[in-house]
Image: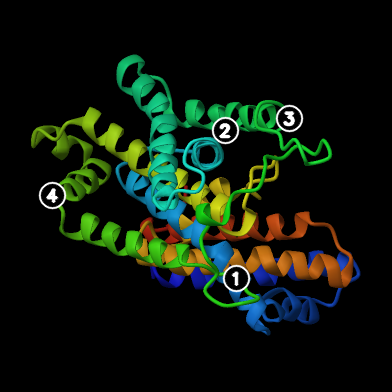
């Protein structure tokens, strides 16, 4: 049932959203067809589906590691942004024209995301602050840094005063896998990290420590598993994957920095992690589903002229029903007479 719960949650989401669609003057079945099937009807649609799924999967895998250990990183959006900033800065001002540039950008983005995650990790372990609140607030700090950079020091001098950086050189970007499509080799890198995370959690001793720390904190303390080390590893790993995802987005489909760098990948990845049952391969399925909701929302918006918030409403309903299903799975409901 833990794996059947996402399917149940999806079915309930479709069922409950039907009256809402009717209230908007839309026919539910036709809307669902546009939402769930039309984006996959062309090669370009499939390419965009996989392209949007890749950062969601990558961020969700990193978050899942920490969530299993009861370390709640809500700041992946900011770590994604800082990874993109560091890698684009390197690509524009340090290594332009060098063959090693793209690998160096990937390393820089990974380290930048981890460094941003080190802030809530340090405050959690040394000042007992809430990693939830600190990581969440840092999202807005990162967004303000990005806005300042693209309107100031990193603004494109030939960009007609638009808030964006100069475009990256071809050597600093992933090459598309097929002419006319935007899908690139970053998807393969995401799958490699998913496989590595699966081995780490299932077979690695540190992964075992993190699972025990989340499932049985008292047993973890009795066994001598360091709580501080779990916090640091959880946040640094999730920050690293989010920063890497930011690099892959900036060096892939976008090719530059702009205030609209992320459509909310860092927040949506939380839903992906729980839809995927905090399992790396489950995150692949969750990422594909959420990516489809993104594309479907855009398709419905353009075809039926409905608000863009429709897709976010679907995401919220999906998470709500998934959490509700988990309550029924993990707890037994009893009716008691008074």
Q: Furthest residue to the front?
A: 97
Q: Is residue 193 above or below residue 144?
A: below
Earlier-in-chain disc, 1 versus 2: 1
Question: Crowding at label 4, few (<14), some or many (≥20) Cα neighbours within 10 Å?
Answer: few
Earlier-in-chain disc, 2 versus 3: 2
Q: Furthest residue to the bottom?
A: 41
Q: Is residue 134 visible?
A: yes
> Residue 139's spot in the image, x, y percent?
57, 33
Taking depth in this image into account, of 49 and 31 the one nearest to the observer is: 49
The residue that label 1 is drawn on is 49
Q: Furthest residue to the left?
A: 223
What residue is shown at x 16% (from left), y 53% (from top)? Answer: 204
The dot on residue 151 is: 3
Q: Furthest residue to the top?
A: 127
The residue that label 2 is drawn on is 139
Q: Quadrant of the N terminus?
A: bottom left
What residue is shown at x 53% (from left), y 69% (from top)? Answer: 288
> Residue 110's spot in the image, x, y percent?
40, 43
The residue that label 4 is drawn on is 205
What residue is shown at x 35% (from left), y 14% (from top)? Answer: 127
Task: Label 2, secondary structure: give it.
Answer: helix
Taking depth in this image into account, of 200 and 153 the one nearest to the observer is: 153
Count of numbered marks: 4
Earlier-in-chain disc, 1 versus 4: 1
Q: Nearer the viewer, mark 1 or mark 4?
A: 1
Q: Nearer the viewer, mark 3 or mark 1?
A: 3
Q: In the rendered view, does 92 fall on the left or right side of 37?
A: left
Work out how far the residue at label 3 is from the one at label 1, CA to CA, in angstroms.
Answer: 31 Å
Quadrant hosting residue 278: bottom left
Question: Crowding at label 2, few (<14), some or many (≥20) Cα neighbours within 10 Å?
Answer: many
Q: Are marks 2 and 4 in contact (CB under 8 Å)?
A: no
């Amino acid at each position: 049932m833990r794996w059947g719960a996402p399917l149940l949650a999806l079915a309930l989401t479709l069922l409950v959203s039907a009256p809402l669609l009717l209230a908007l003057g839309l026919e539910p079945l036709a809307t669902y067809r546009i939402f769930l099937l039309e984006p996959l009807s062309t090669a370009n649609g499939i390419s965009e589906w996989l392209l949007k799924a890749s950062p969601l999967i990558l961020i969700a895998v990193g978050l899942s590691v920490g969530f299993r250990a009861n370390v709640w990183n809500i700041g992946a959006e900011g770590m994604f942004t800082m990874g993109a900033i560091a890698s684009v800065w390197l690509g524009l001002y340090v290594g332009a024209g060098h063959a090693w540039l793209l690998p160096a950008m990937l390393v820089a983005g990974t380290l930048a995301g981890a460094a941003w995650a080190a802030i809530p990790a340090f405050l959690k372990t040394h000042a007992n602050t809430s990693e939830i609140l600190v990581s969440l607030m840092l999202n807005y700090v990162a967004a303000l840094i990005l806005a300042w950079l693209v309107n100031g020091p990193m603004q494109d001098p030939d960009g007609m005063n638009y808030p964006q950086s100069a475009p990256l050189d071809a050597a600093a970007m992933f090459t598309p896998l097929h002419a006319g499509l935007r899908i690139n080799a970053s998807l393969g890198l995401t799958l490699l990290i998913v496989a590595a995370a699966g081995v780490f959690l299932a077979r690695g001793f540190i992964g075992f420590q993190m699972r025990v720390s989340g499932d049985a904190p008292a047993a973890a303390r009795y066994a001598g598993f360091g709580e501080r080390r779990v916090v640091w590893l959880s946040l640094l790993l999730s920050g690293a994957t989010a920063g890497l995802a930011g690099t892959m987005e900036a060096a892939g489909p976008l090719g530059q920095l702009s205030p609209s760098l992320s459509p909310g990948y860092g927040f949506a990845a939380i839903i992906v992690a729980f839809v995927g049952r905090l399992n790396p391969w489950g995150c692949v399925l969750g990422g594909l589903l959420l990516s489809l909701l993104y594309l479907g929302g855009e398709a419905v918006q353009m075809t039926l002229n409905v608000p863009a918030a429709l897709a976010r409403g679907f995401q919220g309903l999906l998470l709500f029903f998934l959490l509700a299903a988990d309550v029924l799975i993990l707890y037994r409901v009893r009716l008691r007479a008074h």
